[in-house]
Image (cartoon, rainbow, N blue to C red):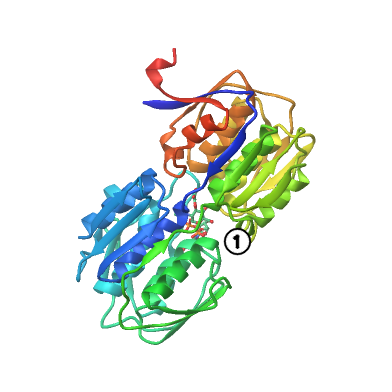
Amino acid sequence: MEAFRIVGGARLSGDVRVTGAKNSVLKLMAAALLAEGTTTLYEVPTILDVEYMAELLRRLGCEVVHDAEARSVAITVPAVPSHKADYDLVRKLRASINVLGPLLARCGEADVALPGGDNIGSRGLDMHVAGLERLGATVRSEHGYLIATRDDQLHGASVWLDFPSVGATENLLMAAVLAKGTTVIDNAAREPEICDICHMLVAMGAQIDGIGTSTLTIEGVDSLSPVEHTTVPDRLVAGTWAVAAVMTRGDITIQRARADHLEIALDKLVSAGATVDEVADGVRVRCADRPRAIDVVTLPYPGFPTDLQPQFIALNSIARGAAMVTENLFEARFRFVNEMVRLGADVRTDGHHAFVRGKEKLSGAPVEAADIRAGAGLVLAGLVAEGTTTVYEPHHVDRGYEGFIDDLVRLGADVSRVQVNQLA
Ligand code: EPU
């Protein structure tokens, strides 16, 4: 068993490079299923979730070659992929639900194991199902699988989402591009990762209007062609580095970071006392003094991202003053607060609000990462805690952050990956 061992106190400074977004590339890999032949993706991060998705596609009959050095993945899709996504992989990777739309469109049937809840909450699929049904699919749940079929072809329809769900928007989009006629998805999610998928689908031959807005209009086409596509930079990894710079009173240039994808988060950091500059190929974030506490409220894009909420709780825990953090997307994301309390943070939660009183110092302790972002938040807290912090279950962090420890070391942190039996 492994853990991250962090000795707090270092000021982080230097350059760090951000690769493609996890939450985009996994869906781009699923979208490759829509066209027979070889689709190649670039700026693919070497993270566990990409390996899981690659394995899932292999089981569906694709050939997948991940060249970590070139940061590319080549996916060769057969004329007729298989249509069953088994539980053993789906349970490791919730994004495997994103093969539902493309498989249904391509094969006429998709059997995808139900992913169940996870450490950040229940995460329903009702909007995925209702939307696909409007496009003419029949969807039933049987023996732990969601089984979607269509008679002849999916047909265009108007779909109103109750909430701008990222996953539902993606599944509907990937089904609608091969449906007969026009589909309108209203109240669609408009995250940069959704735009990235839309751009790749358009390059494949899809017809999509309204990219980047909450109304997507899709004119179905008969077939799509494979493409080469470069993944959008990971705004959540970039945002994590930005918070690290502020918490450690450091100076980090985040190469390839897109300031326009991080507007609210960077604005919050400026309010906390940071200096943020757009530079030639990225964003430079620095902070000379102890940051001020800052309120955040998570909302779908362009609101403040839930995936940066734990990092901002970590920041507030050492800030001057007190702040309210409100989580509107995933009810269980505050579980990580208990681990912050182990580090000496003063945080109280009430429903979906967390009230954080900043303290001068945190104190290093053993803690456990329950999900990717909680893990990142705990690492950031460890960087500023007195003494040693050990973050157990680091595989969660590995799911979303390529070479996190190596980058931290390069920036000056005293961090290492250790075997748990080395800890004594
Ligand atoms: N929801 C429903 N019914 C549905 C779909 C969603 O109730 O049919 C609810 C969920 O339960 C949740 C909320 O709507 O409370 C948001 O869900 P959404 O579908 O938008 O999220 P997702 O597609 O499951 C993706 C990212 C998450 C990120 C969210 C929100 C991937 C693989 N995951 O999840 O990323 O937090 O969007 O931006 O893209 C992470 O990277 O750490 C992560 C959890």
Q: Which residue is mark 1?
A: 301
Percent coordinates x, y for residue 133 in the rendering: 38, 75
Placement of the C terminus among the 4 image quadrants: top left
Mark 1 nearby-residue class (10 Å; few <14, some 14–19, many ≥20) = some
Image position of 342 with respect to 252: above or below: above
Percent coordinates x, y for residue 235 in the rendering: 56, 52
Please state if 9 lies on the left or on the right of 136 as rendered.
right
Please state if 62 lies on the left or on the right of 25 as rendered.
left
Asked whether mark 1 lies closer than 8 Å to ligand 1, one says: yes
The secondary element bearing badge 1 is classed as loop
Instruction: Say whether residue 348 is visible.
Output: no
Furthest-bottom residue in this view:
181
Residue at (55, 62) in percent of width and height: 191
Image position of 158 with respect to 40: above or below: below
Placement of the N terminus among the 4 image quadrants: top left
Percent coordinates x, y for residue 245 in the rendering: 65, 38
Please state if 314 lies on the left or on the right of 150 as rendered.
right
